[in-house]
Amino acid sequence: MMNPDKIGGIGASEIGKLFTRDGINSKTAQSLILEKVEEMINGYRRELTTVAMQHGLFNEEEAFHHVVKPLFPSSRLRSDETIFIKDHLWATPDITDEDQQCVIDIKCPYTISSFFKNISNVPKTYIAQIQCQMLATGYDKGVLCYYLTSNKIDEYGNKIEYNIPIEDRFELINVPCEVGIQDEIMGRHEQFLEKRNLLHDMIKDVPMINDMDFFYLNKEKKVTRLKDKSNVYAWDGKIIKNQNVFYVAE
């Protein structure tokens, strides 16, 4: 069931989109902001998942029971629990361990090359995500658990697992609390809210045009999805809407 408190906000899994090279001004951040504005206008969240995200969700419990639980006996799987840090900012930790006072985030790469790549060079988005989870739980220790597991299945739907011992298919990386990053999360979230509200005010009253008018408009003008523009804020007065999608008509 959709949580209405999440409409227009961001969770720990998305916070990394504000930490790319160009930060809040990046195309990645702008796309996220537009997505959240659309949630506010349409009144619902689209739960979009990539193939990698689906793979992670399907194998999270397996990683917990086979890898994490034997090493952290008091840990518990809690990926269905949301912890709000503040309005429009939350985290949903995969696993927490109260005795160890740590949060554990499971990553399930499905290729051998990505497994070793992410171990040797931990993505900044992963760091931002687990720092956000530590911020939510109040714990000062984080652990990234990489669990290499196949995404191939046989004709009966059974997973064809790698012929590699399980003890060689996982890696734990300790991530200590970094107050500087956590402060940056809060700061960038404030910037996100400012830019989100600016875009919301700019496009909230754009009228919906019907399919016929949209068809003939495309014959007469260059029409591009707003999300494909490099700067979504540069098109005030030229934005139209058809079937709940925003476009720029030049």
Image (cartoon, rainbow, N blue to C red):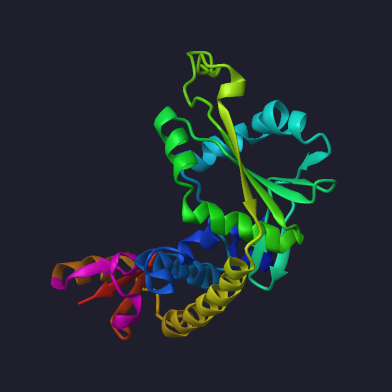
In the rendered image, residue 196, in percent from the top left (x then y), is placed at: 49, 77
62 sits to left or right of 96: left
Q: Identify the image quadrant of residue 108.
A: top right
- Determine the residue positioned at 69% across, 58% down: 134
**Does the magenta-highlighted stretch encompass residue 221?**
yes
Of residues 210 and 136, which is closer to you in this image? 136
Q: Identify the image quadrant of residue 116.
A: top left
How many numbered circles are shown? 0
- Determine the residue positioned at 49% across, 47% down: 122
Of residues 216 and 145, which is closer to you in this image? 145
- Determine the residue positioned at 55% across, 59% down: 128
Quadrant of the snapshot with the C terminus: bottom left
Q: Which residues are magenta?
A: 220-235
Reply above or below: 169 against 43.
above
Of residues 220 and 135, which is closer to you in this image? 135
- Determine the residue positioned at 51% across, 75% down: 192
In the rendered image, residue 153, in percent from the top left (x then y), is placed at: 49, 19
Residue 8 in view in this figure: no
Reply above or below: 146 against 184.
above
In the rendered image, residue 171, in percent from the top left (x then y), is placed at: 58, 34
95 sits to left or right of 214: right
In the rendered image, residue 20, in percent from the top left (x then y), is placed at: 41, 63
72 sits to left or right of 28: right
Q: Identify the image quadrant of residue 138.
A: bottom right
171 sits to left or right of 29: right
Residue 132 in view in this figure: yes
